[in-house]
Amino acid sequence: MKQKFKPKGSVVAALDVGTTKISCFIARMTDDEGNFDVVGVGHQASAGIRGGTVVDLEAAETAIRQTVHAAENMAAETMKGYPLREVVINVPGIHAHSHHFSADIDVLGHEVTDQDVRRALARAQDQNLSTDRDMVHTIPVGYVIDGHHGIRDPRGLFGQQMQVDIHLVTGDSGALRNIATCIERSHLDIAALCVSPYAAGLASLVEDEMDLGCTVVDMGGGVTSIAVFHSGKLIYTDSIPVGGQHVTSDIARGLTTSLAQAERLKTLYGSAIASTNDENEMIDVPQIGEDDHVHPNHVPRSLLIGIIQPRVEEIFELVRSRLQDSGLGSAAGRRVVLTGGASQLPGLRDLGQAVLDKQVRLGRPIRLSGLPDAVSGPAFATTAGLLTYIAERADEMPAQVMAQAAPENLWQRIRLWLRENW
């Protein structure tokens, strides 16, 4: 049986530390089945983070503190004056890497127990991975008993030998420790970690998409991350170091305007697909260092879209290349779900369908109740998914796999493991 990570009435928080924004959701568990209500939200522009990597500890820590404080203020009535202590945090996709292993366990005619499965998972975690990588997820993706494939849950079945196919996700130790330092300096403890595109998928995919095969493309400011789901499990993750900020930079250079104005133009007039009216529609582009009231600068909208489209095409072509190189083939499915703040650009879905040759839809958090409209869009899928992860998939934490303890001591063992490794 899976251990319930938090009992009814507990408060749990998710913290998504991204390149362009930091967001925090505080939720209260409403039952013992993993359901919760969001009682506090906070978000603001990121600082000290570039391309998913901490580049300024003090700036990142300040931004994290302010974001968490805003969420705490909104959840004040629920928290009754107690400060937030534990958070589930994201692991930026750029620091994550997939590994696949198989572990064989002798069952010797007995009934397969939870302990047998855990032994196999622990054996996979003992693989001699690089010392500069930390374990993030240990996910059993398939079981074979005495040559019989397609077993989704072996517990209770009988056989002589069981093979467990396992997907291990690791993260770059240095980068994760820098993120952890920011969290700890904000007087918070890390309860669990989850790779960003995995969380985004947990928030935005329906069950059939997870089962039949689906690729989540999480388009952030500095990183575009990929997560492939099949048979309800995460089977592959990857990333490319290009995101919405690169589109903004291209606009700023191409139109010789400031980054702030480039972001504004992208939001107001941008599109990934050209239309016949673009040549006739004029937009005002303030020039760097000039008084735009004295020297107005009007350019056709087609010029803006001509800058945006090649960069977005490049992102999708890189995603397509990574999926081809993964060797997953049909397991990746014919469906793609776009999430992340950069996925909200008009025309992106149509361009994605053309480049990836798959069905594409825009994803948003669908599993949370009580989300304000302002934080219910694709940009907050990862934050919402972190809550789903801790409620439903905490058994994939490497710490829990290693915690060979009685249920009442399990959480203490996990906290000890996290403290020793972080």
Image (tube, rainbow, N blue to C red):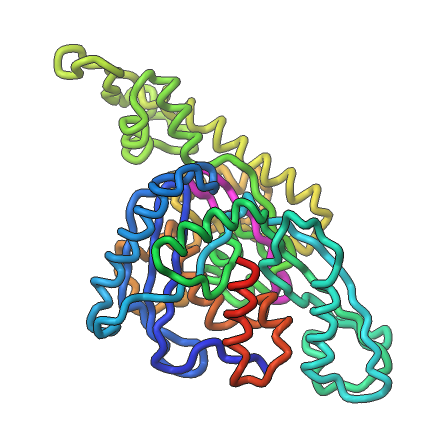
Say which residue appears at 67% left-offset and 67% top-offset.
140
Main secondary structure found in the magenta portion: strand
Q: Residue furthest front?
A: 420
Residue occupying the far top of the picture: 295
**Residue 281, image quadrant:** top left
Frontmost residue, 414 versus 34: 414
Look at the image and tell me whether residue 213 can be seen: no
Residues drawn in magenta = 217-233
Residue 409, compared with residue 85, is above or below; it is below
Position of the N terminus, as image quadrant, is: bottom right
Left or right of residue 391: residue 410: right
Seen at 80% across and 86% down, the residue is 158
Residue 296 lies, in percent from the top left, at: 19, 14
Q: Is residue 16 visible?
A: yes
The structure residue drawn at horizontal position 63% and vertical position 50%, both measured from the top left corner, is: 133
Vertical placement of residue 4 versus 315, above or below? below
Q: Residue at x 42, y 63 (%)?
A: 189
